Image (cartoon, rainbow, N blue to C red):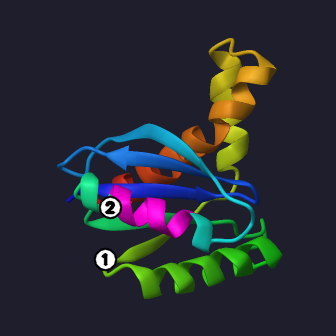
Amino acid sequence: MRYLGLDLGTKTIGLALSDKLGLIATSYKVLTHDNNPNTCFLELKSLIKTLNIDALVLGLPKNMNNTLGPRALETLKFKEDLEKEIDIPIYLEDERLTTKSAEAYLIEGNMRRNKRKDVIDKVAATIILQSFLDRRK
């Protein structure tokens, strides 16, 4: 199975792609949106078809105490709206601390701050997707 990982932000959506066996996640790209999910649904639908995606993995930003805050509720609404547009499964993956982990990886790789902001969302999506893939093994 091939998966597409999503890290939903307020202005961007980081994307990561799995290999065809569903074992390894790779950073893919970043979509921009104007806080209106409908603006990116067409592009997501096109990617799903073009890349032969079997399922989506959407990061769920839970609070550290495992409760759902405002961002998590927005993510659940995004999932609900997206499910009306596509007919493949959408799995939720806990994304606590993924952005911090992504930033740490980029800093460790000596990436400059201005370059980090351009790629951090797709790196976070990669961490989300790889966590999901590792749990499925």
Residue designated by label 2:
48
Does 103 appear in magenta? no
Q: Residue at x 74, y 66 (%)?
A: 35
Main SS, magenta region, reads: helix
Give the magenta part as a residue range.
40-47
Q: Where is residue 10 in the image (x, y as percent from the top left)?
A: 76, 60
Residue designated by label 1:
88
Instruction: Assess whether mark 2 and mark 1 are in contact (beta carbons under 8 angstroms).
Output: yes
When the figure is inspected, residue 117 is found, relative to residue 70, above or below; the finding is above
Mark 1 or 2 closer to N-term? Answer: 2
SS at circle 1: loop
- Say which mark, if any, is on residue 99: none
Residue 49 visible in rendering: yes
Closer-to-camera residue (112/83): 83
Q: Distance between the residues labelled 1 and 2?
A: 9 Å
When the figure is inspected, residue 37 is found, relative to residue 121, above or below; the finding is below
